[in-house]
Image (tube, coloured by chain):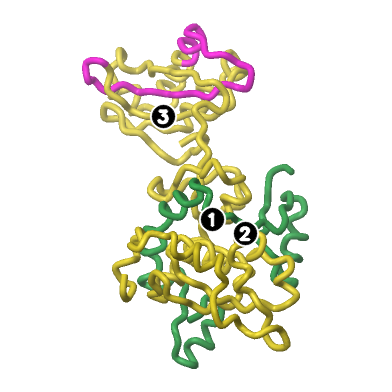
Chain colours: A green, B yellow
Amino acid sequence: MTIAAAARAKADGYVFIGASNPASGPFRARIRSRILQLAQDGEPVVPMAETFTFDDAPAAFATLTGPHPPGKLALVNEH
Amino acid sequence: MFGRSHFTVSYLGANVYPENVTVGLEQPAVSGWGTGKFVLEVAGDADANPRLHVTVELAPGERPDAARERLLAESIRAQLHRLNSEFAHYVPAASQRPAVTLRPAGDPGHEVIAQVTGGYTTAITTSASGVFAKPSTLTFPEAASLLLAGTTAADLLHTSGAGHRETVLLHGAAGAVGTSVLQQARVLGVRVVAPLARRTSASSGASAGSPSHTGLACSTGSGPPLPRALPPRWTRSAATRPATPRWPWSRTGPGW
């Protein structure tokens, strides 16, 4: 199964997972509080690649178009 | 409803518009103390009669004070009476003056996390059912990044049906979703084999976020072969997990 290659999944007959799937939306809504509880307990660590101010948002989008960054990019009000 | 202008409150047969309350807050005699943010609501008083309540945020450094609350209440009443004929005609004079509560800047103020559409904004209205307390363990950038990747990862594990001590093969483990899959799999006691390209394995989110899983990472192509047996540390980690997973999706997984 895949979360990235929807067309390939359809062509080759395997499962594509996306938030718009009928079963995915309700499941994801349900699981949010569990994930947040795990985060409060310190289990999921969120790898951050880089933060950008709003003024630097174009640089953030430029980074997104490059090689897959090793973590999340975030726009912040201040550093 | 802080700062929002398109909600009305029904009070004794009249619609009360936040815009009119704003005019009351902006009068020169009272406008210096506040930030312009307020909550407008109707609540019962001690005798269960409806009473219009306005909670107003003070500017930083300003302190709540009964005299200021009275001045603001009168300013708001005067503007509601002047600008809203429903209010002037239907609401009895004795009930026209709102109860005003002043709050210090940022009080109560809660750090929250929500998945929204249109998040590039300073203010947003969204369904309360989708708003959660921000885990205190996370910074704001981390919290903002948690739920999309986290729920996608949960969805993948859920759909895979993988159960305790079963093994999944995960491509793209170094990304945000992949890293979250590794972390959630550890909680569930699901083993993960994750081929990583050599260039990502050194600095990947997988290694940064989940050190006990890096023993499973190997490069594709010219790299070393996939491990035949799971490393001892991983096996121990999985074995210490409860035999019955506590996750809500456990009902759908085979063997759970």
- Mark 1: amino acid: Pro
**Are dots 1 and 3 in contact, CB under 8 Å?**
no
Q: For the residues tagged 2 and 3, is the chain the same?
A: yes
Q: Quadrant of residue B242?
A: bottom left
Q: For the residues tagged 1 and 3, is the chain the same?
A: no
Task: Give the magenta part as a residue range.
Answer: B46-72
- Pinpoint residue B64: horizontal percent, then vertical percent: 52, 13
Measuring 60% from the left and 16% from the top, which residue is drawn there?
B62
Furthest toward the front, the residue is B232
Figure quadrant of the C terminus of chain A? top right
**Residue B53 sits inside the magenta stretch:** yes
Residue B40 is tagged as: 3
Q: Quadrant of residue B47?
A: top left
Residue B193 is tagged as: none
**Are dots 2 and 1 in contact, CB under 8 Å?**
yes
Q: Where does label 1 land, which residue?
A: A44
Measuring 56% from the left and 19% from the top, which residue is drawn there?
B27
The number of discs equals 3
- Pinpoint residue B60: horizontal percent, then vertical percent: 63, 22
- Mark 2: amino acid: Gly
In this view, the residue in front, B135 or B94, is B135
**Are dots 2 and 3 in contact, CB under 8 Å?**
no
- Pinpoint residue B36: horizontal percent, then vertical percent: 56, 28
Q: Where does label 2 land, which residue?
A: B209
